Every structure is written in structure tokens, then in C-alpha cells.
């Protein structure tokens, strides 16, 4: 049996592939990886799998109906996991179009192709089949400090082009279940961190800028709160939901780990001070630079992951302290990976996003 995983040359998808091949029964159940290789997709991350017959890579778009239909017909997957998306909030503010195209139109076309495939399966395969859509806590909007964490029944209140496009995709997934009976599962997860994280996002950006002696750009007052989860724990939660989740249900995934951004940045600096001390003995936190806030910046996210624990017995296995140490160590041990993802396109983005704020990040 095969599973089709989309967007698995990106941060979470690639971690999922490694995790899956290490965990699946006998480590043998193969993965068909469909990824468009946007700026965020990095085939080099998957280089250790070259020659491994359990991983097949196809470069392509989830919105290419003919391609997806032919892959489904040829490989006959028993499940599809959809990671493919435009994922960066700041980019969605600068240019929402790609987000609408991939996250909404692409998800629609994927659902449509999967529905046609599933409809014609034999009864046994048909009832065992699942499509799992990977989504985000950002669809629920922003919490005030005293509000309870997001449960699965929290109202959808997306505030950025990114979160609005993910919210739309979640609604499509729900509709394909209710209208056509497609056996869907949806997960809404909080902020991930860990190896292979593209350095446009907070934690890897802080690590690579600190090491390069560049400013550490903190938006606004740095008191915005996110709920951080080590990426491997997200992968294990997805495996659990795929295996035991109830069809048509939504599962929130989070780390029970709310932290203000400035605390995250200070923790990264402290770890670097310990693991890669500066020659002059000063702390990396001297590089922190407060800059103009993100437009429409959500103040606080927090996930109530108790349904996942209650129904499937899942809890994260890393604490933030163990996960962030592993992450910083990974970046220190993999300077070639970092150097290569900081290509021309990456430099253009950094110029667009941070030069306007007067920061040479
Ligand atoms: P990422 O940006 O690192 O990777 C996205 C991948 O999707 C890339 O490899 C890219 O090439 C591919 N892709 C983009 N458009 C495509 C298309 N049209 N067809 C096929 N492939 C395409 O993103 P990530 O951080 O790994 O996030 C993966 C998923 O998890 C996304 O759906 C995101 O919304 C969701 N999510 C992310 C986080 C997080 O903290 N990073 C948290 C919760 C949910
Ligand atoms: O909550 C889940 C979401 O987490 C995912 O759905 C998104 O795909 C993922 O990108 C992430 O979104 P955020 O906007 O929360 O992540 P980001 O790393 O971009 O920012 C985290 C916080 O840090 C946020 O409050 C903005 C702030 N920030 C970010 C950057 C890049 C800064 O202060 N400075 C920065 O330079």
C-alpha cells in the first residue's frame, strides 16, 4: 500500500516523510511525494532518501487535476495527506494571489480528483480510504489574554490572507465530506519548529541571523503569543489521526506551550551563547531589533488539544526546553543546508520584508 503525501519537500512534510518511513509497520509502506517545489520546497532535504524505493518524488501542482488523477490511478494510494500550501503569513500580506491559488483552488482540485478516485474503489478499499488535510490554528483568529484556548468548535475568524485561504480550504474539505461522503480528517495545528524549517519563519530566522551577526527583527512589542510544538510531535499526531481518527472529525494539535515571541528570541540567544559563544563574550540578544509590526498581527494563539488526548491518547513528547535545544543544535550542525536555502530568491524576500523597516536582516 502507498500513501500520497503532498507538499512533502517543505518543512513539516519532509519531517513527516522521515518520521513515517522510520515508524510505519516494518518501515516499508511507501510514500508518493507530490510537491511543486516552490521557493519553500527543498529537494535537498530529501536527499538522504535517494535510491530508497519507499520514497517516490513527483514534481507537480496539487491543482493539476490530470496529473493528480493519473498518479492516483497508477499508485492506488490507501490515503492522501495534504501538506501542500503557501504557508508564510508575511508573504500572504505582500502577495495573496498564490495563497488563493494553491490553498483554495489547489485544495478544491485535489479534493475533486481524490473524490473521483475514491468513488470508484472497491467497497473494502473505499471504506478504508482516508484523506487528511493539514491545517492551522490561525483559522480561529486571535485570542485575548483571558480567553480559553481554541477548541475544535471555536468560531472561524481568520485575519490574514494566509489564514483566510486555509479557512476556505477547511470548509471545502468539510463540504466534500458532508456532500459526497469523502472520508476526510482535518487537523488544525499550532506553530511548529524543528529541523529543516525555512529561515523566513521566526525561530530559524533568529538562529541564522544571530550567527551571521545580523539584527534579530522582532515585530511590534514582541509580546504576541504563539503555542509552539516540536515538528516531530506534529508528525506523530498526524499518524495517530490517520490511523484512529473518526471520519469527518477535526482534531486540534498543540504543544500546551504558549510563549511570547520575545521570550522565544531570548531563549534562542541564550542557547547560542552557551553552544556557540561570541568571541567578545557578549550575548546574541544585543542584536535584537524591534521593528514595525506585521499588519493585522494576531495577538495570541493557543490550542486546546484535549480532544486528541481523550480520543487518541496523543500528547507531545518534547518539552519546549528539549525541542528548542535540539533545534538550535541542528542548525549549528547543518550550516550547508542553511547556506543553500539562502539562495537568490531568499535574499530578494529578506530585502522586501525587512529593508523597508530599515533593518539589514
Ligand atoms: P512549507 O511552506 O515549508 O512547505 C510547503 C510545501 O508545499 C513546499 O514544499 C512547497 O513546494 C509545496 N507546495 C506549495 N504549493 C504547492 C502546490 N500548489 N502543489 C504542490 N506542492 C506545493 O510549509 P510547512 O510549514 O511545512 O506547512 C505545511 C502545512 O502545514 C501547510 O498546509 C501549513 O498551512 C500547515 N501548518 C503549518 C504550521 C507551521 O508552523 N509551519 C502549523 C500548522 C499548520
Ligand atoms: O500558528 C500556525 C502557523 O504558524 C502556521 O499556520 C503558519 O504556516 C506558520 O508560518 C506560523 O505562522 P506565524 O505567523 O505564527 O509564524 P512566523 O514564524 O512567521 O511568526 C511567529 C511570530 O513571530 C509571529 O507573531 C510574528 C513574529 N515574527 C516573525 C518574523 C518572521 C517576528 O517578530 N519577526 C519576524 O521576523
Image (tube, helix red, strand yellow):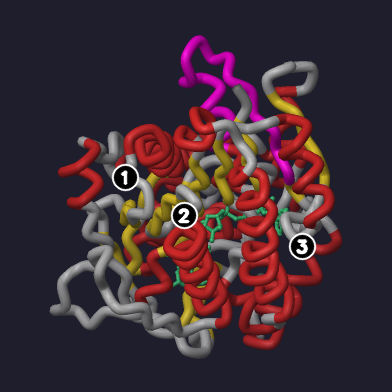
Residues at marks 3 and 1, CA–CA distance in whole angstroms: 40 Å
Question: In the rendered structure, which segment of residues is drawn in magenta?
Answer: 15-34
Labelled disc at residue 246? 1
Q: Residue, x 46% and y 20% (percent of image)?
A: 23
Comparing labels 3 and 1, the label whose residue is closer to the camera: 1
Labelled disc at residue 232? none
Q: Is residue 31 left or right of residue 224?
A: right
In the rendered structure, does residue 33 fall within the stretch colored magenta? yes
Disc 1 secondary structure class: loop
Labelled disc at residue 346? 3
Comparing labels 2 and 3, the label whose residue is closer to the camera: 2
Question: Residue 133: x, y in percent?
Answer: 50, 53
Disc 3 secondary structure class: helix
Q: Nearer the viewer, residue 256 or 85?
A: 85
Earlier in the chain: of badge 2 and badge 3, it is: 2
Question: Residue 39 appears in which quarter of the rendering?
Answer: bottom right
Residue 27 lies, with reference to residue 359, above or below; the image says: above
Question: Residue 270: x, y in percent?
Answer: 38, 51
Which residue does the numbered mark 2 point to in the structure image?
181
Q: Is residue 7 visible?
A: no
Q: Is residue 52 left or right of residue 181?
A: right
Q: Residue, x 82% and y 63% (percent of image)?
A: 345
State whether label 2 is within 8 Å of ligand 1.
no
- Tell me the quadrant of the picture where the C terminus can be found: bottom right
In the rendered structure, does residue 211 fall within the stretch colored magenta? no
Q: Nearer the viewer, residue 171 or 278?
A: 171
Tally the marks.
Answer: 3
Earlier in the chain: of badge 3 and badge 1, it is: 1
Earlier in the chain: of badge 1 and badge 2, it is: 2
Residues at marks 2 and 3, CA–CA distance in whole angstroms: 42 Å
Residue 308 lies, with reference to residue 25, above or below; the image says: below
Amino acid at each position: 500500500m502507498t500513501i500520497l503525501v503532498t507538499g512533502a519537500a517543505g518543512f513539516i512534510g519532509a519531517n513527516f516523510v522521515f518520521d513515517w518511513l522510520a515508524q510505519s509497520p516494518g518501515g516499508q509502506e511507501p510514500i508518493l511525494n507530490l510537491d511543486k517545489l516552490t521557493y519553500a520546497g527543498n529537494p535537498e532535504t530529501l536527499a538522504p532518501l535517494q535510491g530508497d524505493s519507499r520514497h517516490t518524488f513527483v514534481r507537480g501542482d496539487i491543482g493539476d487535476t490530470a496529473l493528480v488523477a493519473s498518479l492516483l490511478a497508477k499508485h492506488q494510494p490507501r490515503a492522501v495527506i495534504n501538506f501542500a500550501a503557501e504557508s508564510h503569513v508575511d508573504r500572504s500580506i505582500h502577495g495573496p494571489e498564490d495563497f488563493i491559488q494553491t490553498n483554495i483552488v489547489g485544495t478544491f482540485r485535489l479534493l475533486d480528483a481524490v473524490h473521483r478516485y475514491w468513488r470508484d474503489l472497491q467497497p473494502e478499499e473505499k471504506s478504508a480510504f482516508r484523506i487528511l488535510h493539514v491545517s492551522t490554528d490561525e483559522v480561529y483568529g486571535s485570542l485575548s489574554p483571558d480567553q480559553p484556548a481554541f477548541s475544535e468548535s471555536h468560531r472561524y475568524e481568520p485575519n490574514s490572507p494566509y489564514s483566510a485561504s486555509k479557512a476556505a480550504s477547511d470548509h471545502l474539505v468539510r463540504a466534500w465530506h458532508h456532500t459526497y461522503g469523502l472520508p476526510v480528517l482535518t487537523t488544525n495545528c499550532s506553530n511548529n519548529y524543528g529541523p529543516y524549517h525555512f529561515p523566513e519563519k521566526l525561530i530559524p530566522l533568529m538562529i541564522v541571523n544571530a550567527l551571521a551577526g545580523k539584527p534579530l527583527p522582532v515585530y511590534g512589542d514582541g509580546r504576541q503569543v504563539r503555542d509552539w510544538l516540536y515538528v516531530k510531535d506534529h508528525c506523530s499526531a498526524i499518524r495517530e489521526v490517520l490511523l484512529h481518527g473518526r471520519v469527518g472529525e477535526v482534531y486540534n494539535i498543540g504543544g500546551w506551550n504558549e510563549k511570547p515571541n520575545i521570550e522565544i528570541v531570548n531563549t534562542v540567544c541564550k542557547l547560542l551563547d552557551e553552544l556557540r559563544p561570541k568571541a567578545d563574550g557578549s550575548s546574541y540578544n544585543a542584536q535584537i531589533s524591534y521593528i514595525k509590526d506585521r499588519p493585522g498581527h494576531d495577538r495570541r494563539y493557543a490550542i486546546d488539544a484535549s480532544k486528541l488526548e481523550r480520543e487518541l491518547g496523543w500528547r507531545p513528547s518534547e518539552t519546549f526546553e528539549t525541542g528548542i535545544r535540539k533545534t538550535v543544535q541542528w542548525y549549528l550542525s547543518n550550516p550547508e543546508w542553511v547556506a543553500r536555502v539562502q539562495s537568490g530568491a531568499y535574499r530578494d524576500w529578506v530585502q522586501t520584508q525587512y529593508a523597508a523597516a530599515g533593518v539589514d536582516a
